[in-house]
């Protein structure tokens, strides 16, 4: 029995060693949603063309349609950044996080970025396997309808929406660093890691690239379910002096996204936000009347 234990133990160590010494690749049989790596190309002063923007449509059965787009953005038209949290049902300390960039002007649109473990066909996500180079890293750029309906409609998960307290100039600087990091991933694959390269701390790295020290190292970078509370503590969410519990109470956008799921992608961002604002106003009025 003792020899069997040592055989199993050393086999485990060998497996871990092989996994950690492997090289990331871009040529696997990827799940359809992760089959393309987006890329930005500069086309003018502050203007960029984004290829392989994911624009899927999701219903309760999964991806109802699967299309990819090319779009152009102007950094000067960037006005807002939104932060989203999708809590894990099993434990509130874990969550998926993502950002949306809102552009006004002649070509109003909203682009979302979700840092993901790039899964192969038939592969499922495991936080434990994610510690040992089981997945490559991918920045998925998508329409806001794609990512939000995948969560709120396809998965029927709660999702909390917060507008970040950043100026348009700060938003532009942050986006420029995401553009750079996205292009680097397109050229040189990297591994995802549950602790060191996950959905939240990769976002934090890009923000800290733009503004060194803006997001000091904190347990919320690994226990991602606490990221909203941490951003509130740092002044990026809500108003000064307000309790995060009050902010979160009105932040669940699940019902608004569900209600507007049939809205065309080009007007979906404005539509769900208007519904979301009305819903919060009604909740606040009810609480005030009580």
Image (cartoon, rainbow, N blue to C red):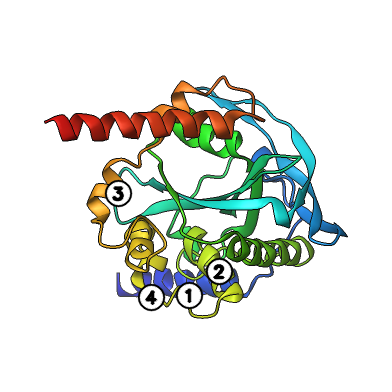
Of the residues under marks 2 and 3, which one precedes in the sequence? 2
Q: Which quadrant holds the N terminus? A: bottom left
Q: Which quadrant holds the C terminus? A: top left
Depth order, front residue of 150/229? 229
Of tags 2 and 3, the one toward the viewer is 3
Residue at the image point whose x is 43% and y is 57% from the top: 127
| Circle 1 residue | 214
Of the residues under marks 1 and 4, which one precedes in the sequence? 4
Task: Determine the CA span between mark 2 and mark 1.
Answer: 7 Å
Neighbourhood count class around disc 1 (C-alpha, 10 Å): few under 14, some 14–19, many 20 upward = few
Name the side, left or right, on which 124 lies relative to 101.
Answer: left
Q: Secondary structure at mark 3?
A: helix
Can residue 156 be seen in the rendering of this structure? no
Task: Determine the CA span between mark 1 and mark 4.
Answer: 47 Å
Residue 207's label in the rendered image is 2
Residue 6's label in the rendered image is 4
Of the residues under marks 2 and 1, which one precedes in the sequence? 2
| Circle 3 residue | 247
Of the residues under marks 4 and 3, which one precedes in the sequence? 4
The reply to whether dot 2 and dot 1 touch (C-beta < 8 Å) is: yes
């Amino acid at each position: 029995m003792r020899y069997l234990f040592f055989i199993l133990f050393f086999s485990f160590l060998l497996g871990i060693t092989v996994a950690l010494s492997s090289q990331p690749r871009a040529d696997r049989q990827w799940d359809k949603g992760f089959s393309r790596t987006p890329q930005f190309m500069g086309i003018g002063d502050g203007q960029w063309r984004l290829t392989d923007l994911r624009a899927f449509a999701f219903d309760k059965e999964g991806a109802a349609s699967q299309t990819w787009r090319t779009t152009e953005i102007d950094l000067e038209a960037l006005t807002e950044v939104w932060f989203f949290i999708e809590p894990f049902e099993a434990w509130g300390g874990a969550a998926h996080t993502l950002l949306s960039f809102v552009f006004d002007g002649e070509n109003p649109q909203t682009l979302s970025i979700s840092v993901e473990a790039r899964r192969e066909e038939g592969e499922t996500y495991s936080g434990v396997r994610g510690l040992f180079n089981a997945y490559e890293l991918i920045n998925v750029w998508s329409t806001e309808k794609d990512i939000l309906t995948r969560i709120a409609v396809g998965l029927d998960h709660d999702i909390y929406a917060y507008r970040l307290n950043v100026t348009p100039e700060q938003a532009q600087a942050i986006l420029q660093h995401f553009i750079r990091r996205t292009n680097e991933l397109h050229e040189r694959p990297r591994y995802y890691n549950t602790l060191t390269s996950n959905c939240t701390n990769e976002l934090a790295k890009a923000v800290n690239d733009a503004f060194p020290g803006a997001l000091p190292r904190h347990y919320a970078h690994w226990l991602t379910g606490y990221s909203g509370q941490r951003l509130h503590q740092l002044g990026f969410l809500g108003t000064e002096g307000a309790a995060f519990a009050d902010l979160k109470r009105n932040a669940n956008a699940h019902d608004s996204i569900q209600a507007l799921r049939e809205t065309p992608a080009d007007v979906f961002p404005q539509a769900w936000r208007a519904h979301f604002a009305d819903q919060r106003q009604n909740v606040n009025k009810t609480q005030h009347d009580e």
